[in-house]
Image: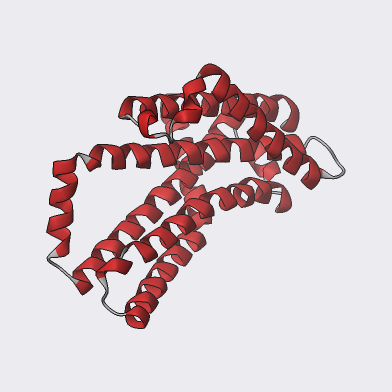
Amino acid sequence: MPTSSGKMLGSLYKKEMRELIPEIIVMVIVAIVLNSFIYFRLGPNPNIVVLPLFLLLGLVGLMPFVSSFRLLGGEWNNNTIYLMMSLPVKGGLILGTKLMALISEYIIGTVIAGICAVAFIMAIQPELLPDLLEIAGIEGLWEYLWLAYLGSIVFLLYLISISFFSQVVGKLVTRLSGLVTALTFLVTLWLSGKFSNLIFPELGNIASPDGFPSRMVSAGIGVYLVIVVLIFLITVLVYNSRVEL
């Protein structure tokens, strides 16, 4: 029934988010400590505003990818995979909720980084924030910022989907599972990159001065979104037909 499926989706999503609470707490602590250290160590200098922001965004982007191995691999390491198998759900729901939780972790992390950046600016030069917002509006930078943010989410989905696929394939063998997982990840990453260049050759020129219009960025995001869906569907198929049985 739709209602029971919705409740199962909510329950699994809450379970995965509880698993990610330690990482989210770490991000908050690192954000506070990093901004405080830079502020008191280097002083209230407007030129260093981007330094803690970039460092935080790097951490925020890395943690969900690393957590993808812990969330799925932990099911086997803690033997909770057998409990998951006993539930009336398929791999699509199990892997989908993990994917949703990891993207939620990333969004929460970017919000934390944004709040810290605003707080940093307000602490050193409050009048700078309205000026920055006005400049962004006049120059039309918001469109590119939103596209860049959306692109970062899709790229993270891309890496996580390959992570899930490589881990599921790795669990199909009894020996050298870690090596098989690593090789599968690298090969899938290479093949999907070749596939993206095949269906959208102009993607390789996106960094050139003439290749940065928003429509091209949007097309690139669409290409990788299609790849994410394909990899996820293959992962679910392998999970349902091989791993669960």
| Residue at (19% x, 47% y) in the render | 136
240 displayed left or right of 223: right
Image coordinates for residue 241, horizontal then vertical, percent: 71, 24
Q: Residue at x 24, y 62 (%)?
A: 118
Rendering quarter of residue 244: top right
In the displayed structure, would residue 88 be above or below residue 62? above
- Asked whether residue 168 is in view, the answer is no
Residue 154 location (% of width, % of height): 45, 36
For the C terminus, give its image quadrant: top right
Image side of residue 2 versus residue 122, left or right: right
Measuring 51% from the left and 63% from the top, which residue is drawn there? 22
**Percent position of residue 61, x then y:** 48, 51
Residue 188: x percent and y percent? 67, 32
- Residue at 38 percent across and 26 percent down: it is 216
- Viewer-closest of 100 and 217: 217
Name the residue at the front extreme.
209
Q: How is the image coloured?
A: secondary structure
Please state which of residues 46 and 67 is positioned toward the viewer in this rendering: 46
- Residue 182 in view, yes or no: yes
Say which quarter of the image contains residue 184.
top right
